[in-house]
Image (cartoon, rainbow, N blue to C red):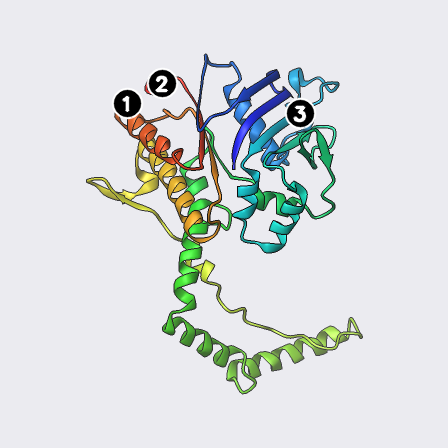
Amino acid sequence: MKIDNIKILNFRSIKNTSFECSNFNIFVGQNNTGKTNFFEAIQWLFNGTPKSIDIEDLKYKSESSNTIEVEITFSNALQGAESMRNEANKTKIKNLLGTSDKVTIKRSSLEPKKRIVLIGDEIKDPGTGFDKALNDFLPKFEYISTRHYFEDVAKFSNKTPVGIMLSTVLEAILESNEKYIEFKQKFKSLFEDDDSEIKIKFDALGESVRLYLEKQFSDCESVKFEVTPPSFEDLLKKFETVVNDGVETYAHEKGDGMQRALMLAIIQAYADFRKNREDIGKSFLFFIDEAELHLHPTAQRKLKTVLLELCQNQDQVFLNTHSHFY
């Protein structure tokens, strides 16, 4: 599934524009000509308005009478639906598409929290709770802005690329690891079994607290203290990325060029990882703001080669640049 066409109306400095898209798309222009605004308009369509931003500030010339509209038409929609692994979401999308292999997604400042779905010129009403299915269906959107720092990609959380990769890999390992299974059984025996010494003492302490609490709230029937089993995700909260490029140091101690190159490498590895494990066949959209930022000309050439390789199958790359290497 790929982007065929992008239309933007009244977003920041962009009054009205339309682009036909290919696999590898390069935007070149002087500073302050709207390249980044174009990318952020796409981000707005996918993610909506950030909580820290007033929708009025996104309008062309900040004029309240201007209505923002961002519209993307995707081709190969049937293939995109077929690649979905969640059967309930897949059914919703297939019912919506019918036999159409193209679908248009639109967001307007008139209803900024809602995305409109069009098949041809017909607006479809997919019903409530459709947004989750739509996010599952659309290509994975990865935007690397000039304000996107290494820590935003590499720190552990359930939404960052490296966090998803590491936690999923660790989960797969632990699910079949005999020592981990034994550890969970011992934890249950230690903290949860009725004859556990710790549980008995915790229950006694809870009853003592209940007696005091009951004096203020007579309806109180019990107070229990429970120890939550450790989550495998907790094991990653303090991880660090170490890079040896002749000098082995933590990634955050490397120069800006190395950090940006590493960030892009993590995103690319994340795309491969998702395809192999979670979203087989799911396509990716890479939007890279000032792709040459902090990179030596040699590194710029190598990055271009990597990005071109990404486009050989079903992914698309969109980048803006001042570099002649692109």
| Residue, disc 2 | 323
Quarter holding residue 260: top left
Q: Which residue reaches farthest front?
A: 99
Name the residue located 64 percent from the left edge and 36 percent from the top edge. 51
Q: Please say if 148 is above or below 65.
A: below
Quarter holding residue 64: top right
Cα gap from disc 3 to disc 2, whole angstroms? 30 Å
Would you call the spot at circle 1 few (<14 residues within 10 Å), some (14-19), or many (20 or more)? few
Question: Mark 1 vs mark 2: which is more N-terminal?
Answer: 1
Q: Quadrant of the C terminus?
A: top left
Q: Position of residue 255 (x, y in %)?
A: 31, 33
Query: Disc 1 marks which amino acid?
Result: Pro
| Residue, disc 1 | 297
Q: Which residue reaches farthest left?
A: 246
Q: Position of residue 303 (x, y in %)?
A: 33, 30
Q: Nearer the viewer, residue 136 or 68?
A: 136
